[in-house]
Image: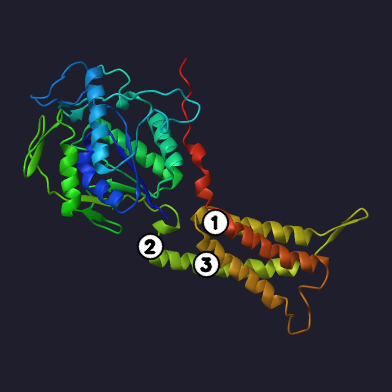
Amino acid sequence: MVERILFVHAHPGDETVTTGATISRLVRQGAHVTVLTCTRGEQNDLVTESPGAGAPEEIAELRASELSRAMSVLGVSDYRFLGETGARWEGLEPRRYRDSGMTWGAAGPQPALEVPDALVSADEGEVASDIAAAILQVQPDVVVSYGPDGIDGHPDSRRVHDATRWATEVLRVPFYVLGQSHGRGAVSVDDPESLEAKREALGSYPSQFVVGDDVFQRASGAPIPLDAPERFGRLRPPNRGFGGYGRGARIIACIFALVIGIAVGAVLTVVHQSTVVVGSTVVPWGLIAALVVAAALLTGLRIVYETRVVAGFAAAGLLLAEGVLSLGTPSGTVLVANNLAGVVWTIGSVLIAALVLAWPRFSTLRTGRIEAPAAKG
C-alpha cells in the first residue's frame, strides 16, 4: 500500500527550505507526496539580482512558476494552493490567500499592514476548513507542517500551524511538525542524495535564494548550511483518548472495564427473564432493559475512551458472566432458559458487542466540527 503524506506550507520556497530533502526521499521510496502551499509569497523579499521585481501580482506569478520547477526537481506531481480546487471547502467559491508579510515590532514579528485578503486576516475556521478539504481528498497517512512558532515567527507560518493542527485533530490524522527531534516517532533526514536534491530544488528559486557550495541564503538573512538535517516529531494532542493515558492508567482502565462488564453482565442475565403484564400484554421489560443497558455501556466506553480496547474488555466481562450463569446455579436454577427471552438475550448481547467493536472509530465521523464559513455576499 502506497504511503500518502501531505506537506502544508505558507509560501513557495518554504517547502524546499524546511522539507526538501524529506520530500525527495519519500518520493524515491514510492510515497505519494502532496504539497499544499497557502499563499504565493507576494510580500517576500527578492534577491538584488533577481529580474522581474515588481508589483505583488508579478511576484506571485514568479513564485508560482518557481514552485512548479522545484516540484519537478523533487518529483512531486500533486501540488496545490490553498483556497483553490482540491483545497477549498465544498460549496465555497475559490479564493486566494495572500502573503501577510512581516514587520518587526516591539512584540516581535507582526503582519505587514494593509494587505488585502491576507492569510492572517482570514477566519481561522475557514483556513482550517480548506486544509481539512485537502486532507479529506488526499487521505494522507501523515500531515507535516510547522511547529507553533512557524518559521522565524512569521505570522503566516504560525497561522498555518494553528489551522493545520485544528484540521488534523478534528480528522484524527497524525501531525508531524518541524524541529522536534526527540520523543516517540521522531524522524531525521540528512542522507546525501536527498540533500543534493534539496540543493537543486533551491536553485529553482533564483528570486529568493542564493545557493553556494555549502550554504544558501535568502534575500535577507544569515547563511544556512545546505547539509543541515531536517527533523520532525509527532505533535500529539495532550491526554486525548485512550492513547493519551500512561501505561498504568490504561491497564487500570481495562481491568475496571472487565470488572464492570462482569458485574453488569451478571445483573442483566438475572433480570432478562423479568416481565410485567400491562392489560392483556406481557411486556418483557427485563430483556428490553438488558439489551439497552448492554448497548449503552459498550457504546459509551467506545466514545469516552476512543478505542475498542476498553469496550472490548467490558464486552468480554459481560459475555463471560452471561456464559457462566447460563450453566446454572449450584441449586439447579437455570438463569438463561431455553425460551425466546433466553435466546434473544444470548444472541442479542453477542451481536451488540460485535457491532460496537466493529463500528468505525466514532471520532472519524466528527468532520462537522470544522464548519465552512457563510459565503460572503
In-front residue for pair 105/207: 207
Residue hosting label 3: 256
Q: Position of residue 268 (x, y in %)?
A: 70, 66
Q: CA distance from mark 2 to mark 3?
A: 15 Å
User: Is residue 150 among the parts visible in the rendering?
Assistant: no
Name the element at disc 2.
Answer: loop
Q: Residue at x 35, y 25 (%)?
A: 122
Numbered label attached to residue 302 = 1
Circle 2 residues within 10 Å: few <14, some 14–19, many ≥20 = few
- Disc 3 residue type (three-letter): Phe
Q: Which mark is residue 185?
A: none
Q: Is residue 269 visible?
A: yes
Badge 2 or badge 3: first in the primary sequence: 2
Is the N terminus in the top left, top right, bottom left or bottom right quadrant?
bottom left
Find the distance from the CA under tag 2 to the CA under tag 1.
18 Å
- Does 175 sit above or below residue 254? above
Residue at 73%, 68% (x, y): give it.
346
Q: Is residue 274 above or below residue 116?
A: below
Between label 2 and label 3, give the one nearer the viewer.
2
Q: Secondary structure at mark 1?
A: helix
* Mark 3 residue element: helix
